[in-house]
């Protein structure tokens, strides 16, 4: 059995030159993170690996001037005082993040959170399955915050208590993620996406207000399946409305497959009392071979901007990186290999005040292409749907201009004509 230690004894385990992984998500080991922040000297010459988002706003480089951190998404929490020599943004797809943690990263200490061991000596990860199997197998030392407040979920992965080196006993509530209400103008966007989804299809959703609007528009569909990386609060609405059953899935029939959950108590209570949600590692949820076995797969993700060449930017806004590569392209390419699978990329046609078009002539030099022009199937705005499948370069540009905000269409058409003349040497 693991040795039970205090949080103070935990920080004493850290030594210069070590790499320490901090589990992220709704069950981040809050007690261990708090202990690090109360004892910043322990981070001297230590490198941390951890996701950073609104739920886990941890910039560990602020602990000590010699501390480094690896992460995979840029965030406003990291931008202030950003030092690229100490804060390392790794531009990996989620499937590659898993392989990096499983096979490449030299992890000295893994910090996780689990339930107390059951009668068989198994500890549950509760509502996270994404990276913990990879990390706990790779780390030299595993330290677990043991939280009696965590629910033992039927579909969650477990770890043998004997495979954990140290327990730190501390209870805290699961971290809450409160979604921002979808804007009224997103209702039309959601309805447009819903028209591309049929009863019995399996869907993958990203996160954000656009995705929430899409889920709301799917509430009257039936027998939908779920295979995704993250489930939000809307999942409960859809199950209770009878929209989700998974009855027609070609694999994992009747099961909701996800890597993690992120929401409010309503979502967590539903999962804790449900036996239909399975938490799987990213090596399963984002694996192209697995995704290719899901007939009628509809993957829906948000974009920042799309140019008339069908290049998609999902990471940069106003010249600043606001996100990371994530799992979008994993799902896009998985859908292309699935029988009757399609990828759907959604965005508002313009910024909130209608001053800037998000369908642009060309991705600007201060941004990056996240999804190549060869991969997108559908682009959807509140003004319509652009079907890019098997379309020529000219047809794609015309279809994108048709779903741009009306006040920008003429300028986009002129820009496209100029680009075509230039390409022809005119």
Image (spheres, rainbow, N blue to C red):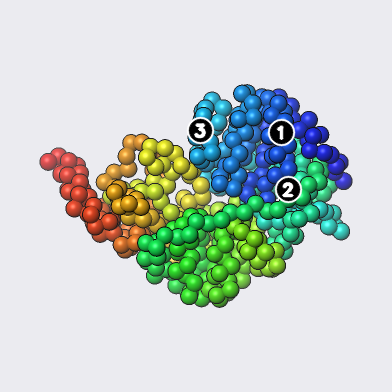
Q: Position of residue 302 (x, y in %)?
A: 43, 54
Left or right: 124 as drawn, with respect to 229: right
Of the two numbered discs 2 and 3 on the same chain, state the one appearing first in sequence.
3
Q: Secondary structure at mark 3?
A: loop
Q: Is residue 338 left or right of residue 415?
A: right
Residue 145 x %, y %: 76, 45
What percent of the width, then of the height, locates residue 382? 34, 61
- The residue positioned farthest toward the left in the image shown: 426
- Expressed as whole percent of the image width and height from the top left, the position of residue 285 reads 58, 56
Residue denoted by label 3: 80
Q: Residue at x 83, y 57 (%)?
A: 118
Tag 3: Cα neighbours inside 10 Å, few (<14), some, or many (≥20)? few
Q: Quadrant of the C terminus?
A: top left
Which disc is residue 38 wearing? 1
Disc 2 residue crowd, few under 14, some 14–19, many 20+, Cα 10 Å: many
Q: State how far apart marks 1 and 2 are (Cα).
A: 19 Å
Q: Is residue 382 above or below residue 92?
A: below
Q: For this view, does 116 lie left or right of residue 132? A: right
> Distance from label 2 to label 3 (Cα)?
29 Å
Question: Splitting the image into 4 quarters, where does residue 154 fall?
Answer: bottom right
Label 2 sits on residue: 113
Which of labels 1 and 2 is toward the front? 1
As helix, strand or loop, the secondary structure at mark 2 comes to: strand
Q: Residues within 10 Å of mark 1 (few under 14, many from 20)?
A: few
Residue 259 makes an appearance in the image = no
Q: Earlier in the sequence, mark 3 or mark 1?
A: 1
Mark 2 vs mark 3: in front: 3
Circles 2 and 3: CB distance less than 8 Å? no
**Residue 313's disc number:** none
Toward the viewer: 260 or 289?
260
């Amino acid at each position: 059995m693991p040795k039970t230690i205090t949080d103070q004894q935990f920080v004493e385990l850290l030594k210069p030159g070590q790499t320490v992984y901090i589990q992220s998500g709704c069950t981040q080991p809050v007690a261990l993170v708090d202990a690090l922040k109360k004892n910043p000297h322990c981070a001297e010459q230590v490198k941390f690996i951890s996701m950073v988002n609104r739920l886990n706003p941890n910039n560990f480089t602020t602990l000590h001037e010699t501390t480094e951190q690896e992460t995979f998404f840029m965030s406003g929490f990291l931008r202030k005082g950003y030092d690229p020599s100490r804060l390392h943004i790794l531009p990996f797809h989620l499937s590659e993040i898993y392989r990096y943690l499983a096979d490449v990263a030299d992890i000295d200490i893994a910090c996780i959170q689990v339930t107390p061991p059951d009668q068989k000596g198994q500890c549950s990860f509760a509502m996270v399955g994404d990276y913990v199997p990879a990390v706990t197998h790779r780390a030299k030392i595993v330290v677990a915050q043991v939280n009696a407040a965590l629910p033992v979920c039927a579909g969650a992965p477990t770890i043998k208590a004997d495979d954990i080196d140290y327990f730190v006993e501390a209870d805290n509530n699961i971290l809450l993620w409160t979604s921002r209400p979808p804007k009224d103008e997103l209702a039309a966007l959601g309805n447009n996406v819903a028209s591309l989804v049929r009863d019995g299809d399996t869907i993958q959703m990203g996160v954000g207000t656009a995705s929430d609007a899409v889920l709301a528009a799917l509430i009257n569909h039936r027998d939908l399946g779920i295979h995704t990386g993250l489930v939000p609060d809307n999942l409960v609405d859809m199950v209770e409305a009878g929209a989700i059953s998974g009855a027609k899935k070609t694999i994992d029939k009747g099961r909701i497959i996800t890597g993690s959950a992120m929401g409010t108590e309503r979502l967590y209570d539903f999962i804790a009392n449900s036996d239909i949600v399975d938490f799987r590692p990213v090596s399963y949820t984002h694996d192209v071979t697995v995704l290719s076995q899901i007939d009628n797969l509809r993957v829906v993700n948000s974009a920042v901007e799309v140019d008339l060449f069908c290049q998609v930017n999902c990471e940069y806004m106003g010249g600043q990186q606001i996100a990371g590569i994530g799992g979008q392209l994993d799902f896009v390419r998985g859908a292309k290999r699935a029988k009757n699978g399609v990828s759907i990329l959604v965005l508002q046609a313009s910024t909130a005040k209608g001053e800037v078009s998000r369908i642009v002539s060309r991705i600007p030099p201060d941004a990056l292409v996240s999804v190549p022009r060869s991969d997108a199937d559908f682009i959807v705005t509140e003004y319509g749907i652009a079907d890019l499948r098997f379309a020529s370069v000219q047809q794609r540009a015309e279809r994108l201009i048709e779903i741009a905000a009306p006040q920008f269409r003429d300028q986009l058409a002129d820009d496209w004509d100029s680009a075509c003349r230039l390409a022809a040497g005119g």
